[in-house]
Amino acid sequence: MAIYSVGRKRVILALLLTTALLLTLDLRGNAVIDAGRDGFTQVMRPVETATGVVTNPIERMWKGITDYDDLEEENLALQEQVDRLIGTQAAAEAAVIEGQELQALYSLPSLSGIDTEVARVVGAAANNLDQVIEINKGSSSGIAVGMAVVNQAGLVGKVTQVTRTTARVMLVTDSRYSVAVKVTSSSGLDDLVPTNTSPSGLTPSEIEAARTTTTTVPALPGPVIPGVTLPGGSPVPDTTLPGAAVGADGEPILDPATGERLTAEQIAGLNELAAQEAAASTSTTSTTLPGGPGVDSTPATTTTTTIAEVIEKEYGALEGRGRLRLPQIKFVQDSPSLSELVVGDLVETAGGSESLAPTGIPVGRVVNRADRPGSGGPLLDVELYADLGRLNFVRVVLYKPLSEVDQ
Amino acid sequence: MFASFVQGPLVRVIPLGLVLLALQRTIFVEIQVGGVIIQIMMAMAAAAGVAGGSERGAIVGFVFGVMFDLAEGTPLGSTATAMTLAGAVGGLLALIAADPHWWLEAIFTSLGTAVGVVMIPVTRAFIGEPAPFQGELGIVVVVAAASAAVMSPLLVPLGRWCLRMRRPEWKQPIDEPVQ
């Protein structure tokens, strides 16, 4: 049996000092350690592959024993979900196509214009502290440190280490993860605004009324193109050369993308797209006002437009808090006079010239709001769209922020 | 020098570490108990300490920890510190009994493992990582220690083998007949 002695204590101290030295060298960045890490990964790969083959039956047996009931319940729930989604798939696809056409028409930034690289999840962190996965694509596929990683549901994490054929992805739930996000409200959430949160004393109905604007557009004299209106809803006068359309000011209507004159048929197509988009976010009613004494008897068209319900409320920083706790948004400031941060608000990446994640990646939904005393602002717990416990395939967004494009 | 290396423990410790590391990164990531990953390398380091004393346990823990950090991409030395201490603590606790029963070895192994698991966030805190202490640390420590105790009847003899040690044999002294 081992006997305790001063000599043994020296050995232990020497080992601990060596670990401290290694830590210091690694944290300051050392090419030798990096090369050693890559070499060790190459050595470990065949050992891991062989071990995986040998232990695979044991893993399956264990999962068969422990997860069978959950799997059965989940299968039933998923089948129900699939049935429901099939019904809305066609409408959703049409909406996506229309959205992309409109974004392309107005030259708006869109995720659809950014290349992605599909990768398979081949490993996970072997400790209980880090929330990291390993994917089977690396620098040879154009992947670089910092790139955002998503799946079909939303944001998953970001790339933190890259080798030629593999990369490590830090998940959103890791306590070291942080990303700039924006909080937006979704349609139908306005009912959740409590009465006593308005500093002006307005009730929700008064707040709703205050968010409504009324504009009066005089009726145009002369003939108009039947069935064709401008995006604002006004009719198009039929005083133009054949094949070309002009606006209310008499100037030809130009394509914002190409600068070419639009025909009446093209405007009709655009109006149809715009009307479908507007139907999702606005409600428009038209009434004819009677003429009063001394007023021209020409009828006037009154268009009442409700402001779009999807509004950007606030920007903040989303930070992970570990495997069992929801990520949290900090540095947000509640502005009750503009909008209230409420449960159910949508969260997506904010983008920006310095951000590693492009704007518009869906992240999740606010499920809890915790108010803090003082000027700290509220804390928002976010339930992620992506199920980080069941990642099989992910997409790496091959995006570089504008500040790094020329480097 | 070559002879001393061949006859030393590293010839067996490194291949054993490779196999355990592969197991840790494959099957033990999938087979979790209560959502906690069982730390077999940490348990092996503590068991090596129980089998061969604090010095040898610390050496085994250091080697395993460096291998773990290299493979996992964690800061080199962070897990090595924890595993070195796990092996040392396992060896120090084993001094309590000259020839401990299997259940005492299980307790020593589990305590060494628990110390090592707690040391991981402590080390991470020292190098400035944000919020290394998470709410489930208590559950992680309990599950890792309990699993180490369960595995110790296998791991302690494995530790003796890789350290080229034999279990001490105690013989009862024969009473000489008084003439």
Image (cartoon, rainbow, N blue to C red):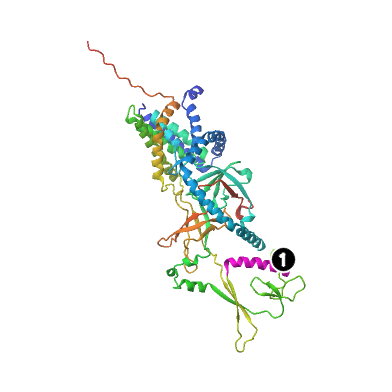
Q: Position of residue B104 (x, y in %)?
A: 34, 32
Residue A185 is situated, as x and y percent measured from the top left of the image, at: 52, 63
Q: Quadrant of residue A219?
A: bottom right
Q: Residue under mark 1: which chain is it in?
A: A
What residue is rendered at 67% in x and 72% in y? A230
Q: Can residue A131 be seen in the rendering of this structure?
A: yes
Query: For the point 41% across and 24% down, which residue is it?
Result: B165
Instruction: Give the residue at mark 1.
Output: A259
Q: Which residues are magenta?
A: A263-282
Q: Nearer the viewer, residue A74 or A227?
A: A74
Q: Is residue B53 visible?
A: no
Tell me if residue B71 comes above or below residue A324 in the rendering: above
Q: Where is residue A268 shown, x and y percent of the image? A: 69, 69
Q: Position of residue A293 (x, y in %)?
A: 60, 89
Relative horizontal placement of residue A263, taking residue A200 as reference (left or right)? right
Asked if residue A306 is among those painted magenta in the image, a careful observer would answer no
